[in-house]
Amino acid sequence: MKELQNQRTAFGQPGLEPRWTQGNKDGVGTAYAISSRIWFTLSNGILNEVYYPTVDSPQIRNLQYLITDGESFFHEEKHHLHTKTERIAPQVLGYRITNSDPEGRYTITKEIITDSRDSCILQHTRLTGNTQMLAMLRLYVLCAPQLGIGGWNDSAKVVDVAGVKILTAHQDGNWLAMAATVPFTRTSCGYLGKSDGWTDLADNFQMDWEFHQAQGGNIALTAEIDPSNSQDFTLGLAFGNRQHDAVTTVLLSLDIPFEQKRSRYINQWKRACEDRLLLEEISSDGGNLYHSSFSVLLAHEDKIYPGAMIASLSIPWGEAHGDSQQGGYHLVWPRDMVNSVTALLAAGHTPTALEALIYLAASQREDGGFAQNFWIDGEPYWTGIQLDQVAFPILLAWRLYQHNALRQFDPYPMVMRATKYLINHDPATQQERWEEASGYSPSTLASNIAALVCAATFARERSDESTAQFIEEYADFLESHLEAWTVTTEGTLVPGINRHYIRINPVDIHNPHPNEDPNQGTLTITNRPPGCQWQFSAKEIVDAGFLELVRYGIRQPDDPVIVDSLKVVDAVLKVDTPFGPCWHRYNHDGYGQREDGGPFLNGGKGRAWPLLTGERGHYELAAEHDVQPYIQAMEAFASDTGLLPEQIWDEPDRPDAHLYLGRPTGSAMPLAWAHAEYIMLLRSVRDGQVFERIPKVAERYQGDTDARKSTEFLEIWKFNRQIRTVKRGYTLRILALAPFQLRWSTDDWQMVNDTDSTATAIEIEFVDIPIAPNQQSPIHFTFFWTVPNHWENRNYQIAVVG
């Protein structure tokens, strides 16, 4: 390898401020092989973000061809050509892109895959068209690196290997190399918007600049390919942790004919899908979305950290974000990940679900919780507390246990630590599933109740009946308070319906004396556009999260409050599209495409989410209604290549902004959670019951069981929820995280009771105080901490009410 002599350095350092690219993709792909640690995405007929060496690390902004006749026109693929993208085979995440000149003079057909044995993108290209025009065409490839998850401080240079010119770029330990099976006749490295190939060609249709290097900036690589030499060639884009690695990889990948690489790539994906259940029989599109969804979920798993699955290979509205937006959706959210692998489990594929559980166990914090989201290596990105994301790993462990798919892995320690965390931090969550508000959330409480019942199963399997009973009783306590915490009795959204679930009853998790009345809270809604109202009465904000109560079996589908709440949700949140119904997350949502069609940026308007159509389909199945309209709607919301968006446009068409009713916005596409919801809906329909329904939960809360009767009248005091009143006839349970002796009195300290706390296997201690039916005086108590051997030095008082 040698560097070119007398290298010319590009001008215009450091270039324009870097931006990512659009979040709605037309394709995502990777080889189904751990040796190929590279992923790609496609939009508008071109390759955009490429991820390497892990699924959370985007390394380029985009790569496209520039076309000119040198005299009269200049085209770039993503803006000037008509484009069509399709999969090269069912189930296979490889794509054929046909980009055509609007005047019919030429067509560029590309097939894009990755090398199945190494980290190289292969783009086989065929140029066809009018013979006279082809003789005049000049073809250039333009690549915009953003190495190390950022566009600043990249450097580039041209090197020569055995007479082959190769364009390289690097930042720290990230290297890129680009070459083709035909020679680059000219090459250049430049700064974006100043000395790059696009700026050069747009000026006079000629490549006037040939710079051999560009140091420390937002760079672009340009190479000319002479179509007169070959109108059929393969372009390679390889990555490595050293220049030698990247250069060797691209040359080796290009040395083997593309057809051989293509055949291996297709066969690997076909083998990966062999164990899949035949759920396409339930679909309405011949299995197109099911085939794609299954492969898309598999593709979102990392190859260095097995089981780690990100939410999406995208950066929503990336064109409006630069280096400060490092996370995008290419992070691990435990909730999204568990949904993804649960869907794979529903499709008959168990290995990835077990890998995910083991990965979660390795990522669990010492206190038993999980970070809001984190990089593939477990490093937290955002640090909020979402209690449903602590519950979901428990639910995953239980499902794998029920499927006899745990092999040699024992999830018990992880489950018990997560259970301790839930009980210690419940019932208010710092963030609900929309990650924006704290308080009592119906959807969070549903997942927590279900997870606790499952955790009790694990304890009982270990013959720890007392701990199992304690955990179940805490679940019963949450269940018995659902309506009191999350159902308004003063609703005004729909005339005649005063009683319905609200999105969240907002309380501060740091306030040990919260006002738990759902009629009185004020909810702050984030992401509202500047100058707009951002505080609302909590009883007037609704979402469909309460459907999780039906999904797990906590409430019957015909429960009157559920039915009335659905009427409110449909009146306030439902959107009818040409493809079927869809729903907003909640009213006054600000997370979505702006009113003017622009990208979400510090404010917007929440749009409709296709995954909510799937959730509604699960409810309709539980209610024994027709589910096909919801399956058909989700299939219609998907792209031709089988990708489901996070959000769809929910207003009349805006062609100027490329927004159409029922079609994707600039948010994430694909969203793994949406694909998971679709697969689970197919499985649920096949089974005739909701796949995620938990029989033990349904037995406990939909029947009149003796096990539940013992806790119908249980009230709990703990340090993060210091209740001020308890009802006569109830049992008052005092919880703490350390052994204690409770000194308490029912008659203003005239008589004193000393009761030692009862231990549990989850390191939570408790004391029960029965409240007599005729009790009048308050309950007084204090703590003597037995291990440090000292008093709490504070008395607590709880009034007794009727």
Image (cartoon, rainbow, N blue to C red):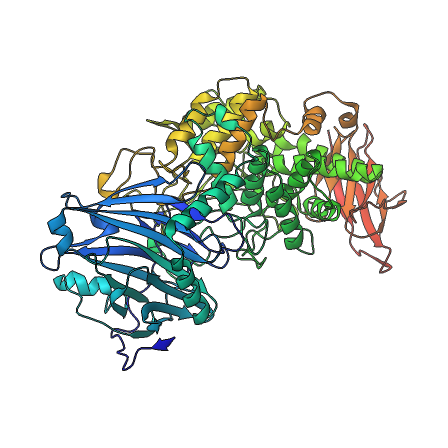
Q: In the drawing, does residue 349 fall left or right of residue 469?
A: left
Q: Nearer the viewer, residue 43 or 454?
A: 43
Rendered residue at 49%/46% (across/down) = 299
Report if residue 733 is visible in the image. Answer: yes
Rendered residue at 13%/56% (across/down) = 136
Rendered residue at 24%/38% (across/down) = 654
Residue 477 lies, in percent from the top left, at 71, 34
Residue 663 lies, in percent from the top left, at 33, 36
Image quarter for residue 138?
A: bottom left
Q: Nearer the viewer, residue 749 or 513?
A: 513
Position of the C terminus by quadrant: top right
Q: In the drawing, does residue 249 fall left or right of residue 506?
A: left
Q: In the drawing, does residue 109 fall left or right of residue 237?
A: left
Q: Is residue 56 above or below residue 221?
A: above
Residue at the far left: name it. 72
Residue 289 lies, in percent from the top left, at 43, 33
Q: In the drawing, does residue 124 fall left or right of residue 759?
A: left
Residue 266 lies, in percent from the top left, at 45, 43
Residue at the far bottom: name it. 6
Q: Nearer the viewer, residue 291 or 741?
A: 291
Report if residue 541 is visible in the image. Answer: no
